Every structure is written in structure tokens, then in C-alpha cells.
Image: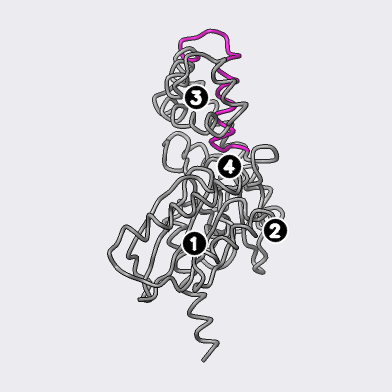
Amino acid sequence: MKCFLGLDGGGTKTECVVVNESGAIIARGRGPASNPTRIGIPAALAALKQTCQSAISSTRIVFEVAALCAGLAGTARPEFREPILQFLKEKFPAAMVDVRTDLELSLDAMPQGPAIVLVVGTGSAAIGRSASGSVRREGGFGPADSDEGSAYDIGRAAIAAVRNASSSDEADDLSRQILRHLGFANWSEVDSKSITNADAVYPRIFPVIAAAADAGNSLAQSLLRSAAEKLAALAHRLAESLQLVGLKLPLGKSGGTVGRSPFFDQAIDQELRRKLPTLSITSLSIEPAEVAAWTALQLFSKKEGAAK
């Protein structure tokens, strides 16, 4: 039985979907982060192997992997894409293998024609398609160069805010919640961990800020409003570069922070409408890993059709 694998990987998790020749989903798997820009190539390859195995072992159906499409953060850079492509070809030697960025998968999930996707997870980025079909991106190159408004950026800003704020009930409460959530006794421990592994600190703070903002903490709300402004500016820069400003088109929101906080979702939508009032804003209804699996099926079908 021929089957087709779709992978979606980023800075928080990796997901795998398996579909059969009719496009029906027959298995799913989940694994750890696989963004090589954040965790390195060896850890990324290990995550991909674990995720694929999780999906394959989740069903008793015996199948042959005919094609695989992997949408992975960090693979816009050739030095990361090539070893991942080679690894997947070696793991599935009989399969067609396609490696692209996770942003491309998200854009593929949008309707045909001009569209924008804003991805907000551990990192942040926007990708869009113009009326002529040209595709461009903004951001998504890691915290040193981008990731504004992301979970990483929010966590980093939150630590600075609670440590620099004048003593108040809201700041003190948020400070205690962050330390408790991270499992550290004091800020010195946080500093030490953030130096050696910033991704184990900053993005993990987002759920605390989100919950506090939803509960009415004004400091947490200020942090999320600031992040929303940055994300809207990111989308606006992309729209300008694609000459989409003023056009009616869909914008899809995707990523691990979307849907986690009503306050943050509303703040993002409000800022997007202020910057780009003609947009129709939605959350992506299709999971990128599903899009990747169907893409793998389409690529295989085209190849088979061309061979006849």
C-alpha cells in the first residue's frame, strides 16, 4: 500500500501526517522541535526520525512511503536544507522527497491568488503571494535578526519588564508566576539558563503572559499589545513589498501562540486592521502537516502522470 508523509517542523514541535492514495489520513505522529537554526542539525535530524517513527508505529497498516514533503523552519538556508534533504532520502530511499520551509506550507493552505500568512510561534514570520504569483517573506531568521512579536520575543521582554518595573502587585505577581513556571528559585538561575539555552527560557514564558493578560494583568496586556504592533508591522512590510496594500485579500494566522489567548488574538487582529484595513483575517483551518502530506501525494501523482 502506497502512502505519503507530510512533515511540519518548527521551534516547538514536529508533526507528521500519513495519507493513502485517496488522500485520507491514516496516521499521525508528533515529536520535539526540529528547527536547525535553534537546536542544530544533529538534534533536528533526531527529531525528524522520532516524529516519522511515531506516525509509522501509530498504525498497524503496512505501507510503502512513496513520497514525502517536509515543511521545516530554517530550511531556507542551504546549509540546513541540504543535510536534512540527504537524511530523509537515506531514511526513505524509495520515496520522492521534497523539503521546503514551514512558511511555504502555510501559504499553500491559503486560497489561490493574493494572500498573506502571519506565523507566530517560537519565532515569527510573514509570507505572501502577489497577484502575479510572486512569493516573498519577512522575518523567520531567528532571534538575532528577526522573530519580533514571537513567543521568544514576548518572553524576553517580560523578563526585562518585571525586573525593571517599579514594585507593584501586578509586576510582583507576574514575576512570581514566571519563576514558578520555569522552575527557578531566582533570576540568577534564569540568567544562567538563558545564556546556555535561551529557547528553554524565553518561549516558555508565553503561556504565563497569555494567562495573566486574559485575567486582566495590565503589564501582561501591555507586553502582548507591543508584540501585536510588531507583528502587524511585519505583515505591513510584506504587503508593501508585494504591492498588496489596499487590496482585499485573506490573511491567515498560524503558529503555536494563535488561539492560546483571546486577548492576544484580539490585539493582533486590531493592529492588523489598523495597518491593513482591507484584509480578511482568519486562522488557518488546515494543519500544515496535512498540507505537506497532500502535497507529497500531488507531487507523486504528477510524476506518475508524466511517466505515462
Residue 74, position as x, y percentages in the image: 62, 51
Q: Which residues are magenta?
A: 148-171
Q: Split into 4 quadrants, where in the image is the N terminus?
A: bottom left
Q: In which quarter of the view is residue 18 placed?
A: bottom left
- Mark 3 touches mark 4? (CB < 8 Å): no
Residue at the disc numbered 2:
243
Kind of residue at disc 1: Ala
Reading the image, the residue beneath label 3 is 220
Question: Circles 3 and 2: CB distance less than 8 Å?
Answer: no
| Image: 82 above or below 166 | below
Colour mode of the rendering:
one colour
The residue lying furthest to the left in this view is 60
Name the amino acid type tagged 4.
Ile
Q: Nearer the viewer, mark 4 or mark 2?
A: 4
Give the vertical position of 114 relative to 149 (above or below). below
**204 vs 57: above or below:** above
Queried whether the magenta region covers residue 156, the answer comes back as yes
Q: Residue at x 65, y 47 (%)?
A: 236
Q: Residues within 10 Å of mark 3 (few under 14, many from 20)?
A: many
Q: Are marks 4 and 2 in contact (CB under 8 Å)?
A: no
| 176 displayed left or right of 167 | left
* Secondary structure predominantly adopted by residues drawn in magenta: helix
User: Nearer the observer, disc 3 or disc 4?
Assistant: 4
Q: Residues within 10 Å of mark 4 (few under 14, many from 20)?
A: some
Q: Which mark is residue 109?
A: 1
> Earlier along the polypeptide chain: callout 1 or callout 2?
1
Label 2 SS: loop
